[in-house]
């Protein structure tokens, strides 16, 4: 008599549960890092502008954030040092992502662009 081989129904359900949890995590985390990449790109673009003031840089960041769908940080929360030939911009922020129930993830981001001011 041959013995049957394969996975039991319980094993299939466990595998499906793990795959579903992994997919949920991926679908929640990828947009957070996409937004972080958009913030880095916006800061890099603004750091290259010359002869603009601090307020102008903040307003331009808000415009770029509006187009890119950045909701975690606003121009008023940036650290901005405007100079004649280069600018320094720094974004420090957190993003909380709910998973299910009262369980969530908290991401801390810190990125900068331009030459830091001499201290």
Image: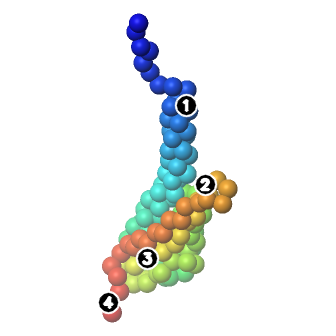
**Residue 34 visible, this angle:** yes
Q: To which residue does mark 2 refer?
A: 99
Give whichever of 45, 15 is nearer the camera: 15
Image quadrant holding the C terminus, namely bottom left
Residue 57 visible in rendering:
no
**Vertical order, 24 against 93 (above or below):** above
Rate crowding at label 3 as few (under 14), some (14 to 19) or many (20 or more) other CA atoms within 10 Å.
many
Note whether 19 is above or below 53 in the view shown.
above
Question: Where on the picture, by quarter, is residue 97?
Answer: bottom right
Which numbered disc flags the more N-terminal residue, 2 or 3?
A: 3
Name which of mark 4 and mark 3 comes first in the sequence.
3
Residue closest to the eye, 29 or 31: 29
- In which image quadrant can residue 90 be found? bottom left
Secondary-structure class at tag 1: helix
Instruction: Give coordinates of residue 26: x percent, y percent.
Output: 50, 47
Q: Residue furthest front?
A: 1
Q: Measure the C-alpha gap from mark 2 to mark 3.
A: 31 Å
Q: Secondary structure at mark 3?
A: strand
Q: Name the residue carrying label 1.
A: 10
Residue 115 spot, x, y in % from top left: 33, 79
Query: Toward which corner of the image does residue 59 lie, by quadrant?
Result: bottom right
Element at label 2? strand
Secondary structure at numbered mark 4: loop
| First in sequence: mark 4 vs mark 2 | 2
In-front residue for pair 5/17: 5
Mark 3 and mark 1: Cα distance apart in space: 53 Å
């Amino acid at each position: 008599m041959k013995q049957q081989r394969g996975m039991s129904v319980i094993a299939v359900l466990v595998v499906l549960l793990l795959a579903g949890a992994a997919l949920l995590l991926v679908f929640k985390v990828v947009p957070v890092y996409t937004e972080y990449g958009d913030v880095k790109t916006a800061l890099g673009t603004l750091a290259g502008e010359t002869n603009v003031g601090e307020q102008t840089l903040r307003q331009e960041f808000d415009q770029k954030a509006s187009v890119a769908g950045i909701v975690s940080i606003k121009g008023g929360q940036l650290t901005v040092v405007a100079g004649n030939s280069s600018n320094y911009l720094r974004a420090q922020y957190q993003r909380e992502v709910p998973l299910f129930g009262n369980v969530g993830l908290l991401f801390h981001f810190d990125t900068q662009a331009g030459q830091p001011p001499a201290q």
